[in-house]
Image (tube, rainbow, N blue to C red):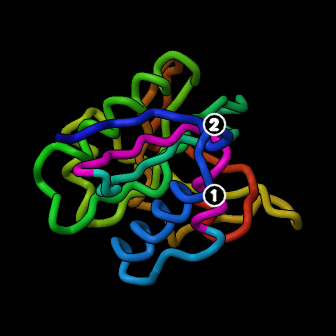
């Protein structure tokens, strides 16, 4: 039997957080840094359990993105993974359904940076590719993040966006997008 939890970081026990981090380390083949983990905390998590084992994780954290002169309260999707032997069974969609429900009720905008192999998945859910330029508000000023152009996706909730315009992210350690 599969069980889906939607819970805030503050309500997760240390053992669950440890299991989630291990799942993410495995799913990203060791390319999931301490900064990536830190960026996935402090918001809502969806966790999929099967037979008492954690098989999926995704989180939604609050960020500020600036577009067209407006700071937008943004639900940013982080750390989406399903254990390799449980993929293509709808677990990722179930986790995103739960996060998108929160996103639509609490934020102006959804955003994420998608891996190449996930582009079709997010597009099928209505996420739109950001075609314009991206940047970040760094400690030394606004800097272009050209390396992220082409991977950023948005889900407009209560705003109109120019997908060919500029979008600027708040600063954080590790991957900005």
Label 2's element?
Answer: strand
User: What residue sits 49% from the left and 22% below the top?
Assistant: 160
Would you call the spot at circle 2 few (<14 residues within 10 Å), some (14-19), or many (20 or more)? some
Residue at the extreme front of the image, as rendered: 52
Where is residue 49 shown, x and y percent of the image? 31, 48
Where is residue 95 shown, x and y percent of the image? 33, 39
User: What residue sits 46% from the left and 81% below the top?
Assistant: 31
Q: Quadrant of residue 146?
A: bottom right
**Which is in the foreground here, disc 1 or disc 2?**
1
Q: In this view, does 107 lie to the left or right of 115?
A: right
Where is residue 170 shown, x and y percent of the image? 73, 50
User: What residue sits 11% from the left and 48% below the top?
Assistant: 89
- Name the one closer to the observer, 29 or 128: 29
Would you call the spot at circle 1 few (<14 residues within 10 Å), some (14-19), or many (20 or more)? many
Q: Image height check: is 174 above or below 126?
A: below
Q: Quadrant of residue 81?
A: bottom left
Residue 172 within the magenta-colored segment of the rendering: no
Residue at the extreme bottom of the image, as rendered: 30
CA gap between label 1 and label 2 equals 21 Å
Label 1's element?
Answer: helix
Q: Image height check: is 64 above or below 73?
A: below
Residue 48 within the magenta-colored segment of the rendering: yes
| Residue with the mark numbered 1 | 39
Q: Which mark is residue 3?
A: none
Q: Can residue 65 be seen in this view?
A: no
Q: Give the range drawn in magenta.
A: 36-51
Where is residue 72 shown, x and y percent of the image? 66, 30
| Residue with the mark numbered 2 | 67
Position of the C terminus by quadrant: bottom right
User: What residue sits 33% from the left and 36% below the top?
Assistant: 4
Position of the N terminus by quadrant: top left
């Amino acid at each position: 039997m599969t069980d889906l939890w939607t819970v805030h970081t503050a309500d997760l026990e240390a053992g669950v957080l440890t299991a989630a981090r291990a799942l993410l380390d495995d799913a990203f083949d060791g390319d999931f840094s301490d900064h990536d983990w830190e960026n996935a905390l402090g918001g809502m998590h969806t966790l999929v359990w099967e037979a008492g084992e954690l098989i999926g994780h995704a989180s939604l954290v609050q960020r500020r993105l600036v577009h067209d002169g407006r700071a937008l309260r943004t639900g940013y999707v982080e750390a989406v993974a399903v254990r390799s032997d449980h993929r293509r069974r709808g677990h990722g969609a179930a986790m995103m359904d739960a996060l998108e429900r929160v996103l639509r009720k609490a934020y102006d905008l959804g955003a994420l940076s998608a891996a190449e192999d996930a582009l079709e998945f997010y597009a099928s859910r209505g996420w739109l590719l950001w075609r314009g330029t991206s940047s970040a508000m760094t400690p030394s000023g606004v800097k272009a993040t050209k390396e992220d152009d082409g991977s950023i996706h948005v889900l407009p909730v209560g705003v109109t966006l120019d997908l060919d315009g500029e979008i600027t992210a708040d600063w954080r350690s590790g991957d900005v997008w």
